[in-house]
Image: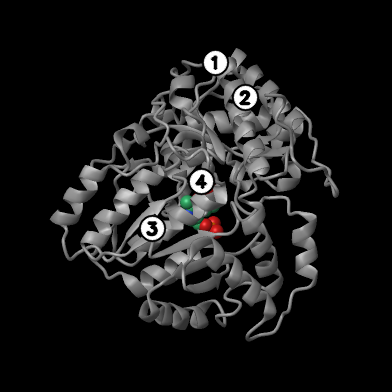
Amino acid sequence: MGVIFEPFKIKSVEPIPLTTREERLARIERAGFNPFQLPASAITFDLLTDSGTAAMSAEQWAAMLVADESYAGSRSFEKFEVAVRALTGLRHVIPTHQGRAAERILFSCAAKPGQRVPSNSHFDTTRANLEYLGVIADDLVIAEGRDPASRHPFKGNVDLDRLARYLDQHAGQVPFGMCTITNNSGGGQPVALENLQAQARLYRARGIPFFLDACRFAENAWFIREREPGQHGKSVEAIAQECFALADGCTMSGKKDALVNMGGLLALNDDTLAARCKQLLILTEGFPTYGGCAARDLEAFAVGLKEGVDERYLEYRAATTRYLAKGLNDVGIPTVQPPGGHAVFIDARAFLPHLPPEQLPGQSLVVELYVEGGVRACEIGSVMFGKKGADGRFEPAALELVRLAMPRRCYTQSHIDRVLEIAAEIARRKESLVGYEMVERPPFLPHFTARFRPLAATPAGALTSARSGAPAAGR
Ligand code: F0G
């Protein structure tokens, strides 16, 4: 096969900020060594998230111009509803401003305190919205899904034996089941069609509704087509439809595979539940024909749902993440295998063995990626999930990962080549990376606003030349 190239040409461009190393050192220090606190104007390659960061197509922009902004019964809603029904086959289509609003509405209407909701891995907002309501969120992903080195083709699969036992053990306590496609918290790993079918059977046999958290439904369907025996002959769209047909409903952030900058949805078949969800929607989001969106958002969303399943686009997208992962691996930076759909996850613990988890190796790498070349990445490790135990001792997260998320249709191969140069430079002198400690820890979602301090002396100027092995303050 020849080079897999971007199946689009560029019609509108935005300059990317270029900064000097000195500027970056000063910026990151002022930001408390937390890239979430950096202004985007100081970032050259923003790989913080693939959410809401897509470049929209000319057709999406054009659709926005013809939008009908009527408060009730807008034409744009009708188009949106047709597009969502065609893809999901679900009867009731409820627009929300983004994915977490759909989650909150569904969970508030369908779950009660003390109940339990299983999934492969709940995404942060899903878990947080369930826990906020006093509902227990359980992750039942297969063992391979927790092993960064395992090359299992569907590491997002649910452990079916565990799910069966779980449903028997908690009979009467499970208002619905969920499955995240692709499994973001587990490395953007896909779920096999066969596994979804088996989950659906387990739920159906017990009369429990089954919901998909479907923001990356197209990438999941692409992986099914590429990796699952017997699926290669089908279109990605047909596979996605088959996945949705197994579910009683879905929540979806449109900011991922539907290629929009804002928008989400809840879709479901149950008439009574849908009516209750619409009531809550009116209370907190808006009238059911616009939800939390402007009609122009719904227009772009409807077009994006089609463009998201385009196979040449998905082929190029999967090639991009593979290319980035291979480039990192080639310079000795280990990543979660195989690379996920929307992001590459660096195994910072394996890459920086001289930094124990309590010295936050992921945060160290995130800071270094910024200082070396203006790359913004996200720590998914002990900063996000580490805890203080009852005895005051630090309990690290299971994995110390750094996520390089790929905004859709945004960066070209030469951007990725530059990111790889930056990573290679860091790999060459990785022993010089220093540990960090959190000096301000907010009680919720600490990664967004926490402030850090390098453990070996050295603010501005000498950050990267500090030697490892220096005494670790605060331990
Ligand atoms: N579910 C999954 C699997 C997600 O990845 C996200 C968002 C949501 C739900 C919530 O959607 O942001 O529209 O409210 N993930 C983003 C990320 C934030 O960076 O992975 P939202």
Give the side of residue 110 with respect to residue 164, left or right: right
Tag 3, which secondary structure?
loop
Mark seen at residue 221:
4
Q: Amino acid at mark 4?
A: Ala
Q: Is residue 65 above or below residue 71?
A: above
Mark 2 or mark 1: whose residue is earlier in sequence: 1
Q: Nearer the viewer, residue 466 or 63?
A: 63
Residue at the bottom extreme? 72
Residue 240 screen position, x and y as percent: 50, 52
Q: Residues within 10 Å of mark 1 (few under 14, many from 20)?
A: some
Identity, as a three-letter code, of the amino acid under mark 3: Leu
Residue contact between numbered discs 2 and 1, judged by CB atoms under 8 Å: no
Q: Residues within 10 Å of mark 3 (few under 14, many from 20)?
A: many
Q: Quickly name the residue at label 1.
A: 332
Q: CA distance from mark 4 to mark 1?
A: 31 Å
Kind of element beneath mark 1: loop
CB of residue at label 3: within 8 Å of ligand 1? no
Query: Which residue is located at x 39 percent, y 33 percent?
Result: 399
Residue positioned 62% across, 70% down in the render: 80
Q: Local crowd at mark 2 within 10 Å, few (<14), some, or many (≥20)?
A: many
Disc 4 on helix, strand or loop? helix
Q: Which residue is labeled 2 in the image?
A: 463
Q: Which residue is mark 3?
A: 246
Q: Is mark 4 within 8 Å of ligand 1?
A: no
Separation (CA) of disc 2 from disc 1: 22 Å
